[in-house]
Image: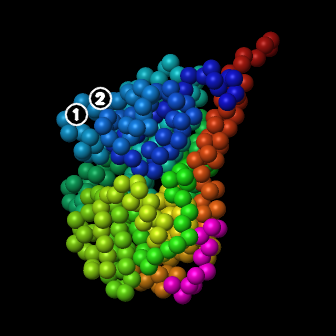
Amino acid sequence: MSSSLVNAKITFVHDWLIDKGGSELVLAAMLELWPKAPVYTLIQNADGPCSEFLQGHRVQTSFLQRIPGVKKHYRSWLPLFPIAIEQFDLSEFDIIISNSHAAAKGVLTGPDQLHISHVCSPIRYAWDLQHQYLREAGVRGLKSWVSRLLLHYIRLWDVRTAHGVDEFIAISHFIARRITKVYRRDSHVIYSPIDVENFPLCSEKEDFYLTVSRLVPYKRINLIVETFNAMPDKKLVVIGAGPDYRKVKALAGPNVTVLGHQPQEILEGYMQRAKAFVFAAEEDFGIVPVEAQSCGTPVIAYGKGGALETVVENKTGIFFCEQTTASLHEAVKRFESMGNCWDPVEIHKHAERFSKARFQQEILSFVEEKWALFCANQTPVEGG
């Protein structure tokens, strides 16, 4: 770490710290580089799964934290996210790193502060996926029009706050294109980190397919289950919890096992032994398919979004082109027809390209470079 960066006061801003998903894994990897940096967030579950990597860090929450029941229903308070994030006083810091998929990038900063925004995605449900989210939520009538008006306001705020960001980091080229589309800004791509040590190689595979996900509509777990219901000779294991758990459980046929949330050691074992990992979502990056590849397990993935950058067709997996049971069914048949052509060692080596060590080195180099340039531009010009 350069001497100028050592002396800089750095803080992090994160949307919320309730569950431990992909964006929280990214935050945890960055906090290892700055083990004393404070964290600002809208809402925190102090006893939740994020508490472990937050040890030693001062966490500052917004006024939303004081609302009764907010930790369970925090998404319902979306209209207040913009004003809540703008109330953080970050004037004591030199460098602000926001880790954002909703509101974090909207913090207020001054001309003598460097604001780097690591963007998991512009607010998906406010931009190109608005119609999908409203449809899947079953929002109709007056509630639909109120929701659309609110999301219109969120879009205006989201674009305005992009002007307060000095440098954008995107988690994939797919998200870089979305940043360009929404904010008309360039971004630097740094792929999300995968803790390959927690998903070691296993060359011995068993006769079952696996999917691991939060059970929410856009993950399309119902599509995967329906496809395997139509293939009763093939076994599928589903691991994950979420609002759709009961629906997925009720939908599952006798050849589909729905296990719910599982601890790391159980999840790791299934990842290692699965014949293939099935992934049907259009994701910004998609950490879990890379974790499967780290175990030497090939992936059958929907061929859009971040999966196109993490899966190498016919070497570490295959793609299906439509989010339909027919398209996924055809992909499973194609996968089976390829027999034993998959090399677990090569699949694991590919996953190592996304290691946490690589991510941390790239993040640190990027921040050092941009801080040096920022400081140089702050130096007054003599004479004139």
Label 2 CA crowd tier, 10 Å (few <14, some 14–19, many 20+): some
Q: Nearer the viewer, residue 112 or 64?
A: 64
Q: Residue at x 26, y 54 (%)?
A: 145
18 vs 35, left or right, is left
Q: Position of residue 157 (x, y in %)?
A: 42, 40
Q: Residue furthest right?
A: 383
Tell whether position 338 is magenta. Answer: yes
Magenta stretch: give its range: 336-346
Q: Position of residue 47 (x, y in %)?
A: 30, 37
Q: Nearer the viewer, residue 35 or 87?
A: 35
Q: Which residue is mark 1?
A: 67
Q: Position of residue 74 (x, y in %)?
A: 28, 43
Q: Position of residue 50 (x, y in %)?
A: 38, 40
305 vs 68, left or right, is right
Residue 167 seen: yes
Task: Point out the image quarter for the C terminus.
Answer: top right
Mark 2: secondary structure: helix
Vertical order, 138 against 327 (above or below): above
Label 1 CA crowd tier, 10 Å (few <14, some 14–19, many 20+): few
Vertical order, 147 against 40 (above or below): below
Vertical order, 149 against 297 (above or below): above
Q: Please state which amino acid type lies under the numbered disc 1.
A: Ile
Q: Please state which amino acid type lies under the numbered disc 2.
A: Phe
228 vs 178, left or right, is left
Q: Which mark is residue 63?
A: 2
Mark 1: secondary structure: loop
Residue 132 seen: no
Residue at mark 1 to residue at mark 2: CA–CA distance: 8 Å
Asked whether the residues under the numbered discs 1 and 2 touch, taking CB atoms below 8 Å apart as contact, a structural biologist would say: yes
Q: Residue at x 41, y 50 (%)?
A: 21
